[in-house]
Image (spheres, rainbow, N blue to C red):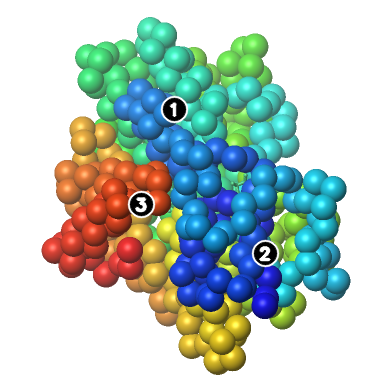
Amino acid sequence: MKTILILGGGIGGIVSANELRKALPSNHKIILIEKNPIHSFAPSFIWLMTGARKISDIQVKLEKLLLPGIELIISEVNNIDVSNKTIKAGNKIFSFDYLIIALGTELNPESIPGLTSATNTFYTLEGSLKIYEDLSNFKGGSIAVVVCSLPYKCPGAPHEGSLLISDYYRKKGMRDKVTINFYTPESQPMPVAGPELGSAVEDLIKSKNIAFNPIHKLKSVDNENRLLFFENKEPVNYDLLIIIPPHRSPAVLKESALANESGWLPVDINTLESKYDNVFAIGDVTSISIPGRWKKDIPMNLPKAGVFAHSQAETVAKIISDRIAGNNSASKFEGFGYCMIEAGNGESGFAYGNFYGEPNPIIHLSNVKRRWHLGKVLFEKWWLTPIGLKRSFYQYLLKISVKILRIPINI
Ligand SMILES: Cc1cc2nc3c(=O)[nH]c(=O)nc-3n(C[C@H](O)[C@H](O)[C@H](O)COP(=O)(O)OP(=O)(O)OC[C@H]3O[C@@H](n4cnc5c(N)ncnc54)[C@H](O)[C@@H]3O)c2cc1C
């Protein structure tokens, strides 16, 4: 009998627990440790922010997303000891034969003077609700959407957020009373995906009358006078500030032997195994330097996104179940990913491709269409539906849609 411990019950943790339970005989133990009993689906925060969703639409009890036979422990992991193959959560020590770390990221707004956890952001559930209130009460003026620093999760989300804010005011008939400025330290949207995708997203943003301001690295904020200070730029005024806060790796990881100097967890790019045997990491917590780079001078990492956490979880579950069965595993994560970019007006763009492509990532962008938006909504419905017949039905619909549209993705 083997024990597989999974740390973190977000996207990667949920998928790996379910895939392992499907693949392994019931005498093997699968234990998932997560601090929050309620799962909130982060990709829906942008809809919470504009009032298109209520909290109850995008939350579900975590236990309802897990197959029978998975032991769920609601507790905070506070120590990872890979040498002794134990972890500590609350006051309990757990031993493991295989470990999957899927602890995601933490937000760290306080690292920039003037920002606090109360600064508006649609990167949290509470923040998205607060922005909805602020957008509703806003009588007009300038809105600044600021990506504070790199890395941040979901390279598409800040752009989607800005596009949906624009759409919110269009629907309210007051778009002409609002200016929207997007600031980012990057030289283009989603640099890792190459110049063509970057220009396409930039054009999309500009087509909605949102000013795109690249190479703006936020230094500090003067809340009283509503001023933003960027490195080597003149101060900028705002009336309503919305940030994508700085991200950092989870504290418990930094204190372990696994983290690199930046706090993230380097893993093999195909097997997701760390430098310790049978210790894997998936999703946002990892640091994966991608093989192809269209800009040689910029070190590029695989973006932090749910789509990667999801398929990495499938790969790792297969590798572990193969090893337990005594087989050599050929399972590999090969860098494929996709993303629907909400553009407003019930439409989305769709980007997909191979982020491990060489010499450069090979990413395709399909025009903004209603069908991609519907695909995103269907995915959300499937993800948030408790295990059971209804969920299987949504999964079937997703599979059919992917086939009909000939999208090369695995659902
Ligand atoms: C606004 C927004 C929109 C997004 N849109 C998309 C999208 O359209 N497509 C896409 O692919 N991605 C999207 N993402 C990104 C996606 O949500 C993340 O990349 C994904 O959730 C990462 O999965 P993960 O399993 O690595 O981490 P998470 O899903 O963040 O899970 C980590 C889990 O670990 C738990 N945890 C952390 N520390 C501890 C501890 N010490 N003890 C116990 N539990 C702990 C956390 O509570 C959390 O549940 C979006 C993100 C945001 C914020």
Q: Secondary structure at mark 1?
A: helix
- Determine whether, in the image, residue 197 is placed left or right of residue 100: left
Residue shown at 24%/44% (left/top)?
373
**Picture quarter with the N terminus:** bottom right
Q: Crowdedness of circle 1 by 10 Å Cα count: few (<14), some, many (20+)?
A: some
Name the amino acid type tagged 2.
Leu
Mark with earlier residue (3, 2)? 2
Is 164 rendered above or below residue 225? below
Pick whichever, 69 or 73, lies toward us: 69
Asked whether residue 350 appears in the rendered view, the answer is no
Asked whether residue 326 appears in the rendered view, the answer is yes
Which residue in the structure is indicated by mark 1?
55
Give me the C-alpha separation between circle 3 and circle 2.
Answer: 24 Å
Q: Is mark 2 within 8 Å of ligand 1?
A: no
Residue shown at 25%/54% (left/top)?
393
Residue 48 occupies quadrant:
top left
Name the amino acid type tagged 1.
Ile
Mark with earlier residue (1, 2)? 2
Find residue 352 and report its horizontal and vertical position in percent.
32, 62
Label of residue 5 in the image = 2
Q: Secondary structure at mark 3?
A: loop
Pick whichever, 157 or 323, lies toward us: 323
Is 18 rendered above or below residue 186? below
Find residue 145 and report its horizontal and vertical position in percent.
47, 31
Give me the C-alpha separation between circle 1 and circle 2.
Answer: 30 Å
Whether label 1 touches label 2, CB < 8 Å: no
Which residue in the structure is indicated by mark 3?
388
Name the amino acid type tagged 3.
Gly
Q: Crowdedness of circle 2 by 10 Å Cα count: few (<14), some, many (20+)?
A: many
